[in-house]
Image (cartoon, helix red, strand yellow):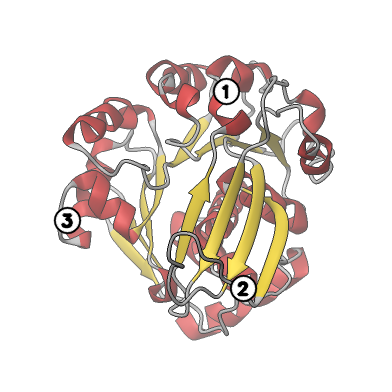
């Protein structure tokens, strides 16, 4: 637990149940069935994965969400014992995501609606201190999946800034794709966002551009100027654009086992570094280190503080 001077990372959004199955070479024809070689049932969602990684690293944080009222409600809450007591309950099913892996390490996702669509701005504000301490960050995850909350971003983000929080957002991919209307909607609240954490395809999709360099620079110009735009590029590492500069942190070669949640793990490492007063440039390497550990583990695990520092030290030698 943090003391009054330790920054806290508040992770808000889609905490749900993940069912991971693979490897699927081709989709079965309607009316048929396919057997998978491996499967896993685990807590997940973008916010859930990030919070679990922070817990492993013992970074002061709080997981902010809501919950349903079915048999999976206590099971999911049990993975977040220091946070779940504050989650409001709704009379609905728990949200699930089925992640299907393919031979090329790509993934497909199938999600229901469930409790995360009920999460509101009031739910989040009621779980936050009324005033941030210096350095506190709120990360909003699963933007388009938390549909009620998304409709309230234009009022929520200014309120978070008023309360003194730094704000980071990982939108994820919109289920209906990037339309001109959706881009215009997102652009209305980007000026109140400090850090935008996207993958490469999302960066291109939100910007409407075909070149990643142009897209990252353009999105950075739309932000508050207190942070920047990060593009997570898988094995190619991560890139950061601010209004002043561009930075690239190459990826760390690892044996890839399960890439689901890689970007969420990166978010945990990147924002943990900022909470620990590291530079944004160094934070990219922290993010890469946590993601590398996560995707090379089975069953899924995240680095503790000692393992994280070891990863960072190894990468620092490579940078030299």
Q: From mark 2 to mark 1, how far is it between C-alphas?
A: 32 Å
Is residue 118 shown above or below 114? above
Q: Is residue 69 left or right of residue 37?
A: right
Residue at 40 percent of width and 37 percent of height:
194
Q: Residue furthest front?
A: 31
Q: Position of residue 233 (x, y in %)?
A: 38, 67
Label 2's element? loop
Q: Which badge, 2 or 1, comes first in the chain's sequence?
A: 2
User: In this orientation, does residue 114 appear?
Assistant: yes
Give the numbered dot on residue 151.
Answer: none
Give the numbered dot on residue 118.
Answer: 1
Residue at 16 percent of width and 56 percent of height:
214
Q: Position of residue 158 (x, y in %)?
A: 42, 19
Label 1's element? helix
| Front disc: 3 or 1 | 1
Residue at 51 percent of width and 65 percent of height:
32
| Front disc: 2 or 1 | 2
Q: Residues within 10 Å of mark 2 (few under 14, many from 20)?
A: few
Q: From mark 3 to mark 1, how far is it between C-alphas?
A: 36 Å
Label 3's element? helix
Q: Residues within 10 Å of mark 3 (few under 14, many from 20)?
A: some
Q: Residues within 10 Å of mark 1 (few under 14, many from 20)?
A: many
Is residue 243 shown above or below 86? below
Q: Position of residue 272 (x, y in %)?
A: 61, 51
Do callouts 3 and 1 mark residues in contact (Cβ within 8 Å)? no
Give the numbered dot on residue 36.
Answer: 2
Give the numbered dot on residue 214.
Answer: 3
Locate the N terminus by quadrant: top right
Q: Is residue 237 left or right of residue 269?
A: left
- Which sits in the foreground, 240 or 142? 142
Residue at 32 percent of width and 60 percent of height:
200
Q: Which badge, 3 or 1, comes first in the chain's sequence?
A: 1
């Amino acid at each position: 637990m943090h003391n009054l001077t330790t920054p806290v990372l508040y992770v808000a959004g889609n905490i749900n149940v993940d069912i991971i199955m693979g490897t699927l070479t081709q989709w079965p024809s309607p009316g048929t069935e396919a057997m998978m070689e491996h499967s896993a049932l685990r807590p997940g969602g973008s916010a859930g994965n990030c919070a679990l990684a922070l817990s492993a690293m013992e970074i002061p944080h709080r997981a902010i969400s809501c919950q349903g009222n079915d048999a999976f409600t206590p099971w999911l809450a049990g993975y977040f014992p220091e946070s779940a007591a504050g989650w409001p309950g709704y009379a609905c099913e728990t949200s699930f995501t089925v992640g299907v892996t393919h031979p090329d390490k790509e993934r497909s996702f199938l999600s229901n609606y469930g409790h995360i669509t009920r999460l509101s701005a009031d739910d989040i504000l009621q779980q936050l201190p009324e005033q941030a301490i210096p350095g506190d960050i709120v990360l909003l995850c699963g933007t388009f999946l938390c549909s009620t909350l998304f409709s309230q971003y234009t009022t929520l983000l200014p309120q978070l800034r008023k309360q003194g929080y730094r704000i980071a957002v990982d939108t994820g991919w919109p289920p209906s794709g990037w339309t001109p209307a959706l881009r215009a909607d997102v652009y209305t609240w980007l000026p109140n966002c400090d850090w935008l954490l996207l993958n490469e395809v999302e960066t291109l999709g939100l910007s409407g551009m075909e070149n990643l360099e142009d897209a990252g620079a353009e999105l950075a110009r739309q932000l508050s100027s207190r942070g920047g735009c990060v593009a997570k590029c898988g094995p190619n590492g991560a890139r950061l654009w601010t209004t002043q500069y561009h930075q690239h942190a190459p990826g760390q070669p690892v044996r890839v086992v399960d890439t689901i949640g890689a970007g969420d793990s990166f978010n945990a490492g990147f924002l943990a570094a900022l909470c620990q007063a590291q530079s944004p440039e160094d934070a990219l390497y922290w993010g890469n280190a946590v993601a590398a550990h996560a995707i090379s583990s089975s069953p899924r695990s995240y680095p503790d503080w000692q393992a994280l520092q070891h990863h960072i030290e190894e990468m620092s030698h490579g940078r030299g």
